[in-house]
Amino acid sequence: MPLLTLLEAFLFQRDLALATQLAAPVLPLPGRIAKCDIAIGSVDDASGISRLLNEHFDKDTVQTTTTPEWIVSTFTESKAIWIVAKDTGGTVRACISSFESIAPYPNSITKCGQNISLVKPWGLVDWFCVHPLWRGKGLASRLLKLLDYITYRVGRKAHVFLKEGCPLPLPQIPIYSTVLKCRKAGTARVSKMREGTGLAIYDYHCKERATGLPMVRVEGLQDYRDLDAWEEALDTELPPCWVFVNGSSIVDSRKGWRSDSLVSMYAFRWIPGKWFSKKPHSDII
């Protein structure tokens, strides 16, 4: 979204809105890219998607730990739309997904006259991965274009995109950025994540390579009232793990919290208006 458009909407304190000045996406031209067929993914692609992500989505110190069963569950639980690129042998070489998402800010696009009886207008772009040997061949661009076309046609017209580490180059402008905080938590007396802990947990589906500890995001606190009980729950209600919270969250520095990576949120086909630079809904970051 052009910087001037974002700043104008912010200066005039406008409500969040669809970027209606952007042209509707068109169906990408048919044909193979880098000897790959690109199409909407299905549950039959779950094993191939999981294998690609576990082998090539990770960073030096982090190992992705998706499973075919979890990929299958995203189709129903998150209304996921997957786009995959498969080579001539049927192996998944690239993928990208759109998960149904909550609105990042209170005045949702649902108030802009959109019919959402069947499809919510918000999506979160995630799990964008291209096999190293297939990068730089146009696959990434084609995946994005087809995802944009499909989601727009079904009514999911506004997307959130999260970028860890260095922000995207100009002219892309982050709507919101935060430096996550993290620490080791949990106890060996607990063997797995479970319900009823009083903590809002979001699984990153990855683990630390050196220790094998899973990595999860936890909804943090915005005041000190329940801080002691919350910190105690992190240490007694979870299995051994790394927990991450938004940089704005209140934490007890004596518990070993440290700053981690920068995470930036970008808007695709929507304009934040007066919410520019404001912390989004906790389900997102």
Image (cartoon, grey):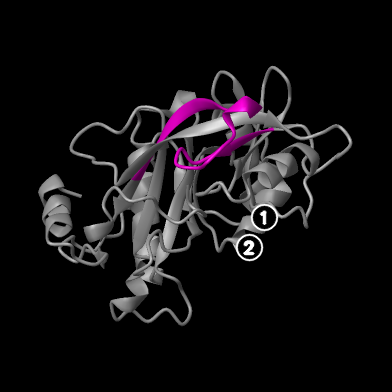
Q: Residue at x 31, y 51 (%)?
A: 267
Decide which of 247, 69 is in the foreground and name it: 247
Q: Which percent across, then down, holds residue 145?
A: 33, 51
Q: Is residue 151 magenta?
A: no
Amino acid identity at mark 1:
Val
User: Going from the N terminus, do you reach mark 2 or mark 1 first?
Assistant: 1
Q: Which percent across, then down, holds residue 10?
A: 17, 56
- Please give left or right for residue 207 compared with residue 101 in the image: right
Decide which of 44, 125 is in the foreground and name it: 125
Q: Is residue 258 magenta?
A: yes
- In the rendered structure, which segment of residues is drawn in magenta? 242-265
Q: Which percent across, then down, holds residue 266?
A: 32, 46
Q: Residue at x 78, y 57 (%)?
A: 196
Name the residue carrying label 2.
77
- Please give left or right for residue 57 compared with residue 279 in the image: right
Mark 1 residue crowding within 10 angstroms, few (<14) / some (14–19) / many (20+): some
SS at mark 1 in the image:
helix
SS at mark 2 in the image:
helix
Decide which of 198, 113 is in the foreground and name it: 198
Decide which of 149, 235 is in the foreground and name it: 235
Amino acid identity at mark 2:
Glu
